[in-house]
Image: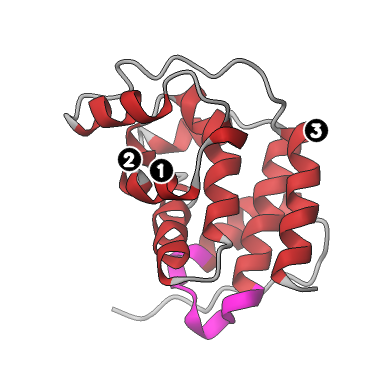
Amino acid sequence: MSTERFKEELLAAFPVSFRLHSPPITRNAGLDPQTYEIEALLEGKRWDQVEFDTIYKLREGLVFFTDSAFQYYLPAYMLAALTDSDRGRDIAMYLEFALTEFDHDYYGPRLRTLTTSQKRTVAEFMERRIQLIGEDGVMEDILVAYRKHWRPYAGTETAPQAPPPHDT
């Protein structure tokens, strides 16, 4: 399946898993000064109205979002990460980091509060990214997080296997 076809299918799944509703309040999204920029660029915008250039500009800011803002704008980040360009791959790198931190005190709870439908959509996104890049090109922690946390929600059983841990 082509990337464009997958983007179309992903976009079709969003209204079901990430229902469009009023954008969350982004004020006080975090304690970092960067949150003021997040507020200014996203305040009052639905996720499907956020332009690629805005996502690129805020690619590092995803970690500063409130839980509700993270959940709400996640579809915009997933679509931007599928853009075949250096900037799309850069967005994907930050997004994938945010989707692997299950054991982190701050990031883990927000990932666990996603609905089953949202987790399925994220799992299919991650599975597709791994297929596009190839297992050899994916960081080990992404493969481990996919296999351990996301794969049970994916629609197929053709998920890649995580490499064995390295001896230290």
Q: Is residue 56 above or below residue 132?
A: above
Q: First in sequence: mark 3 or mark 2? A: 3
Question: Predominant secondary structure in magenta?
Answer: helix
- Residue drawn where x is 74% and y is 51% of the image: 10
User: Which stretch did the figure color magenta?
Assistant: 131-142
- Which of the 4 image quarters holds residue 134? bottom right
Drawn side of residue 11 relative to residue 29, left or right: right
Q: Mark 1 points at which residue?
A: 54
Q: Which of marks 3 and 1 is in front?
A: 1
Q: Distance between the residues labelled 3 and 1?
A: 24 Å
- Which of the 4 image quarters holds residue 22? top right
Q: In this view, does 28 lie above or below 55?
A: above
- Residue drawn where x is 43% and y is 45% of the image: 55
Q: Which mark is residue 109?
A: none
Where does the N terminus fall, quadrant-wise? bottom right
- Residue drawn where x is 69% and y is 32% of the image: 18
The amino acid beneath tag 1 is Thr
- Residue drawn where x is 48% and y is 32% of the image: 70
Helix, strand or loop status at disc 1: helix
Q: Name the residue under label 2.
A: 61
The amino acid beneath tag 2 is Gly
> Can see residue 151?
no
Q: How crowded is mark 3: few (under 14 residues within 10 Å), some or many (20 or more)?
A: few
Q: Residue 16 carries which label?
A: 3
Query: Observer-nearest residue: 108 or 44?
Result: 44
Q: First in sequence: mark 3 or mark 1? A: 3
The amino acid beneath tag 3 is Val
Residue 81 location in percent, x, y?
Answer: 52, 58
